[in-house]
Amino acid sequence: MTQMPGTPKNQTILIVDDTSINLTLMNELLKGQYRTLTANSGEQALQIMQNDTPDLILLDVMMPGIGGLEACRQIKNNPKTAGIPVIFLTAKSDIEDEQIGFITGAVDYITKPISPAIVLARIKTHLKLKAMNDFLSDANAFLTSEVERRTHEVQVIQDVTIMAMATLAETRDSDTGQHLRRTQNYVRRLAQALQSHPQFCDALTDENIELIYKSAPLHDIGKVGIPDRILLKPGKLTPEEFEIMKSHTVMGRDAIAAAEKLLDTPSSFLRFAREIAHRHQEKWDGSGYPDGLSGNDIPVAARLMAVADVYDALISRRVYKPAFPHADAVTMIQAQSGKHFDPAMVDAFVRIADDFQEIAQRFSDPETSDREHE
């Protein structure tokens, strides 16, 4: 990192003048206090700066070839050298000339014949200002890098937390195979298809879609609390057993809410996971569970999950039914528009149904599952 202003440093000054006596005089004035480089033309100065970057430039205005003004323009247009302070040393003393010098990018304008004391004072001032600017620039770069590093750490913690909880749920219901991977990819693709819809554009930002995608595997986290005799039953559940199975939505919500309380943050990244776990079995017409919510009272993330979860159940073989072909599954979901599902989401689903099929094939189970999907 750049040293703090005022810290001893071997600072380099480039002196540019086409008159050798002026170069000699300025070199004598500065030697012992600064490291100096000299150039007798604008071309030579620009060449030197390709390999040796000075801390400050003393630049004559009137030179043959590339004059001081053009050299200054090229220095300021080059990102590598734009931050180097340029002080014009010139015999041109008109106010207009001075204005042009500052417009071109110089930090100071000193007319010849020079006063050594003034030149040294101006050089010292502008080197201090440059050192301060460099320090602040490096500090900002460090802070930006640190924020990026901390943000990455937070994202990793989020991912690990969600996947650890999802894996826990999967171990209780292992025959679902790639179900978690498929459904979370369905959810993300459907959310992306709805992102420009006026009804969803505020809720489905890029950041929210990514969190919903990460949260989707937790939709059945509450099943860890369902007794094995029901969860692992190799057949259709009785009405009494199904009532117990339905409680997994509330248990999932409570488990995630408990984790949120431990995090103690005002806006937990687990909010979408809680909504999905609790509400993904609600139906648009109010006939779902656990609370019979309807329409827009059902959280957007849960509505997305409902479409994804049912589609995957339809195309998967269960003990009580065969695996339906993709086209039949699409037709069945269309038939439930306004009943089980949000009509706007069904419309989007139909438009991207081929993407759902591609996801299902990409994350297909190595063996067909016999697990009943409730």
Image (cartoon, grey):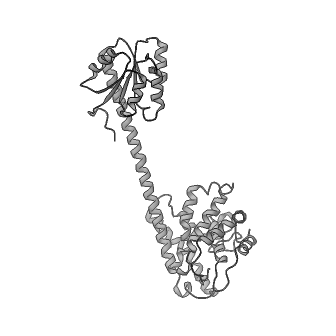
Residue drawn at the location 53% of the way across and 65% of the way down? 214
Q: Give the left or right position of residue 267, taking residue 246 as reference.
A: left
Quarter of the image where the N terminus is located: top left
- In the rendered view, tell whether residue 179 sits above or below residue 142: below
Q: Position of residue 338 (x, y in %)?
A: 74, 68
Q: Is residue 330 visible?
A: yes
Pick whichever, 287 or 325, lies toward us.
Answer: 325
Q: Position of residue 69 (x, y in %)?
A: 47, 21
**Rendered image quadrant of residue 273:** bottom right
Q: Is residue 173 visible?
A: no
Picture mark count: 0
- In the rendered view, tell whether residue 47 sits above or below residue 288: above
Residue drawn at the location 65% of the way across and 63% of the way down? 190
Q: Position of residue 355 (x, y in %)?
A: 66, 65
Q: Give the left or right position of residue 67, taking residue 223 as reference.
A: left
- In the rendered view, tell whether residue 118 sits above or below residue 53: above
**Rendered image quadrant of residue 341:** bottom right
Q: Give the left or right position of residue 130, taking residue 303 as reference.
A: left
Residue that extends furthest to the left in the rendered view of this protein = 32
Quarter of the image where the C terminus is located: bottom right
- In the rendered view, tell whether residue 101 sits above or below residue 192: above
Pick whichever, 269 or 295, lies toward us.
Answer: 269
